[in-house]
Image: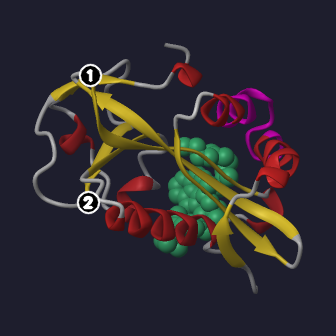
Amino acid sequence: MAYSIRPARPEDKDAIAALNDAAFGGPEEGAIVHALRRDKDSLLSLVATGGDVIIGHIEFFCIQVDGAPMAAGLGPMSVKPSFQKQGVGASLIRHGLEALKEAGETIIFVLGHDTYYPKFGFSAATAKPFDAPWSGPHFMALRLAPGGPERGTLTYPAAFGG
Ligand SMILES: CC(C)(COP(=O)(O)OP(=O)(O)OC[C@H]1O[C@@H](n2cnc3c(N)ncnc32)[C@H](O)[C@@H]1OP(=O)(O)O)[C@@H](O)C(=O)NCCC(=O)NCCS
């Protein structure tokens, strides 16, 4: 299937919200994407397009470590149900991680499927030394470069409910 990946544009807003609603079955994640953008907490937003249609979306945001903006977070991400399990999600993740690495990010956290994100190098062990609003096998991290924080207290953007 032919598709390409590009940064999201302001006019993609409604299509991204509709995609999140369809993939997650409700409005919660679309509202998080909207709030991240509104609060200027988004670091990077990518879409996958097939023709003119947005079939995938991934959001990356800023996380504070002990009060300093020293980490990134992944999410929400979604692929249109009829295009799932065809590599679109993997491609969005790989493009995003590469861009964040180039931008100098050292560590990225995700809260999600513990059978999915380890395929990209995320592990619960890497996230474990950090204090966060969540913990357990679904809370994972990936080091993008050496020199990042080893531990600390994470503060998520207000979009995630404080
Ligand atoms: C999760 C999601 C983004 C994955 O996107 P996708 O394009 O379907 O994933 P890919 O085709 O790139 O899958 C890559 C690999 O992960 C596997 N995979 C896909 N979805 C998975 C899931 N939910 N759990 C575990 N593994 C999954 C694929 O089989 C594939 O494995 P392989 O590399 O061994 O062949 C997509 O299924 C989705 O939008 N789901 C609903 C919303 C959601 O759950 N978002 C994530 C919240 S944490």
- The residue at 87%/79% (across/down) is 51
Is 24 magenta? The answer is yes
Provide the residue designation for mark 1: 67
- Considering only vertical position in the picture, is 133 above or below 35? above
- The residue at 60%/33% (across/down) is 36
Q: Amino acid at mark 2?
A: Leu
In what element is the residue under mark 2? loop
Judging depth in this view, the residue of 69 and 78 nearest the camera is 69
Ligand 1 within 8 angstroms of badge 1 C-beta: no
Horizontal side, residue 83 vs residue 42: left or right: right
Q: Mark 1, mark 2: which one is toward the viewer?
A: 1
Judging depth in this view, the residue of 68 and 57 nearest the camera is 68
- The residue at 24%/53% (across/down) is 106
Residue 60 locus on image (x, y percent) = 50, 47
User: Which range of residues does the magenta coloring cover?
Assistant: 21-33
Can you name the residue that lies furthest to the bottom here? Answer: 2
Provide the residue designation for mark 2: 144
Give ligand 1's quarter of the image. Answer: bottom right
Residue 120 locus on image (x, y percent) = 38, 63
